[in-house]
Image: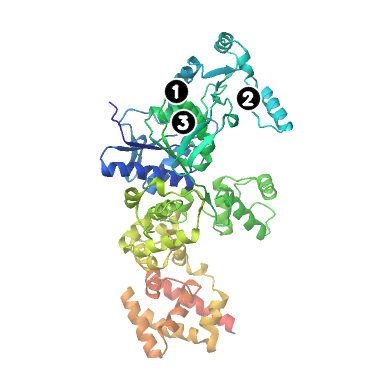
Amino acid sequence: MTTPKAIVTRFAPSPTGRLHVGGARTALFCWALARQANLSNPGSGAFILRIEDTDRLRSSDASTRRILDDLAWLGITWDEGPELRTSSGFAGGGDPRGVGPFEQSARFEMGEYDKVVNTLLDSGRAYHAFETPEELAAMRDAAMKAKWQFRYDRSALSIPEAERRRRAESGEPHVVRFLMADEAIEFDDEIRGHVTIQPSELDDFVIRKADGWPTYHLAVVADDEAMGVTHVIRGEEHLANTPRHVALQKALGYRIPTFAHLSLIFNPDGSKMSKRDRDKAARQACESAGLGSSPVEILPESDFERWMKDKRQALAPDQLEAIADKLDIELPEIDVCDFEAAGFLPETLCNFLSLLGWSPGDDIEKFDNEFLAQRIALGRMVKTAAKFDRKKLLSFNTDSITAMSDGEFHRRWRTWCELHDHAVLKRLDAGQVELLAAALRPRCKTLREAAVSARFALVGAEAIRFDEKAVQKTLLKDDGEGLGVLRGIRGRIEAMTEFTCDAINELVKAYSESAGVGMGKVAQPLRVALTGSTVSPPIDATLAVLGKVQVLTRIDRCLKECAVQAS
Ligand code: GLU
């Protein structure tokens, strides 16, 4: 039994790659509208996740799974669609209205699209056409030379209908084209307003390809109708497709859904936010490092050379990540998983994404998904392209981390480290991780930054490289005042019986009082000796996490190295 719903939205990704933040924003708005309906009238909204995998060459199950995982990570749950269970439980999916399956490949196998194509053939609104790809290419070429916009000239219609059917049924290669009516197509877009397309701008587009698969246009229209979709919310790049969809919907007697095309997302410099930005950043890093050969083994030399020379070439995500790791650079985040790996919090990313093209008004900027669901209104969305301001996102993320409890941050950081920085959990015991988490939380912008700040504790004393400037300024200056502090405090550290943060604080305080120097003059030399630089977590946590033996070893090594430098 199908229960009618007031609002049915759908997010319909093609599983040909990773989930772009633009797609995540679409999914979030679709989720929020359906949720809004459910808040005012439970059961009246549904958010569908549909997998548009008709491009058999480029689609993959792995990519579908990643998209599902990314949505689950963002906290965007879908009421209907492929089911997903993650380690934290049920993430979304199901088919309570019996409108599935939700993969277009499965719907194709069931003959769903052929049914619709046949309806159009039978009503005379579609026809078989037999031009070969070469013939079509020649027609396109001729149109280009004559500076016309190519439109299929309907030559197939000069073949009598019975003959066309006979040839198609006998297995002659063919496509099926939609017979466009000679009338303007009009529709209302909630964001763009009224749109009118003249018949001269539309041609008899293909609805079923020669291999029997439906085109995107046919599949989307068939599925939106079969799934009772009331609101089609998608990126502006699909606006040009919508007249075709409306023409199909009218020819088939389908409902015309409400349309809303979301503005594109740009980089602050006005360029389109694309995966290529990552290639560009990695290429620039290779150029400035003067690399003549690939810095990573997984990238064959010939591919590396081609990629360096030709700016249009793109590497696979794992190749780019390997280069970034090797050169110790950060690539601009583009896909949802990039933001996850960079240590952003999902709720903060959702908050930020929902402000791209929409705002709740009243100067409100910080909110959660539930608030978005309460307030979202298509009428408040803007046409102008949205700018993706990474600095703002980073400041949102910093604020969220600052507002978090130590316990929550510890839990989240552990989970992040399990996926992205095994060394933290491998080298440190549970107590050390907890201690570091509490020390780092108030001063890190991302989960990743916390892991980077923890690196000093993951290596042996011999791996510490002393920063030249820090050594000069903190240890050698003023006749080696800092070295004097290290020598003086060393014995007191050795004598400690309890090596807790409190005890360490007491010791530093007592030493600074007895030596008549400020706390900073004690803490900074210790920082340099223990981590190589003047930046580290608070001094008590820095010592406590290393433990007494390691602290003494590092102080001794520093004194020895500096003695050589000073002499
Ligand atoms: N599958 C399309 C895409 O990934 C979306 C189609 C739609 O929303 O209508 O771009």
| x and y percentages locating residue 110 in the rendered image | 42, 21
| x and y percentages locating residue 180 in the rendered image | 54, 24
Position of 376 with respect to 533 (left or right) is: left
Asked if the residue at label 2 sits under 8 Å from ligand 1, the reply is no
| x and y percentages locating residue 509 in the rendered image | 36, 83
Position of 238 with respect to 87 (left or right) is: right
Pointer 1 residue: 252
* Residue 88 vertical placement versus 112 (above, below): below
Q: Which amino acid type is shown beneath numbered disc 3?
A: Val
Secondary structure at numbered mark 1: helix
C-alpha distance separating marks 3 and 2 = 22 Å
**Label drawn at residue 220:** 3
Between 300 and 77, the one lying in front of the other is 77
In the rendered structure, are the residues bearing label 1 and label 2 in contact, judged by CB atoms less than 8 Å apart? no
User: Residue 498, can we see it?
Assistant: no
Secondary structure at numbered mark 2: loop
Asked if the residue at label 3 sits under 8 Å from ligand 1, the reply is yes
